[in-house]
Amino acid sequence: MKLAIIGLAGIGLAGIGLAGCATGSGGESPETGMAPMSCNAAPAQYHIGHDATQAMGAAILKDSGARTLRWGPPNSAWTMDYRQDRVNVRYDGQMKIVEITCG
């Protein structure tokens, strides 16, 4: 009886581990059920030189098609993880946007 319970628990845990490998239909993300968005920084390049404000961030997000925005303060370190749905916006000490990239 004890062996049967342990066996069933092991099967349940294996199923949970494989659930992370599932893919949604139509290219949807299994975590969100939403279609993945991809960043394109080219349409947002004209924002370089503008003030780094919340409204400007919203405009950059819209222009780039990204799902998320990451602000890069001056002299700050960033993680090197790459996310195709994220736009990165670096600004200088005067709060002027100096670089817009994806990743």
Image (spheres, rainbow, N blue to C red):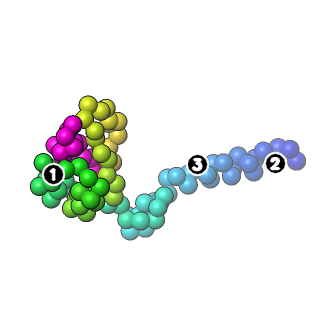
Q: Earlier in the sequence, mark 3 or mark 2?
A: 2
| Residue 39 shows up from this direction | no
The residue singled out by tag 1 in the image is: 50
Residue 25 coordinates in the image, percent (x, y): 43, 67
- Count of numbered circles in the view: 3
The residue singled out by tag 3 in the image is: 17
Give the residue displayed 31% in from the left and 32% down from the top: 77
Q: Nearer the viewer, mark 3 or mark 2?
A: 3
Above or below residue 77? Residue 63 is: below
Residue 4 marker: 2
Residue 96 coordinates in the image, percent (x, y): 18, 45
- Distance Cα–Cα, label 1 vs label 3: 46 Å
Q: Earlier in the sequence, mark 1 or mark 3?
A: 3
22 or 42, nearer to the observer: 42
Q: Nearer the viewer, mark 2 or mark 1?
A: 1
Give the residue displayed 34% in from the left and 54% down from the top: 68
Q: Which residues are magenta?
A: 85-101
Q: Mark 3 belongs to which amino acid? A: Gly
Check if residue 95 falls in the magenta segment: yes
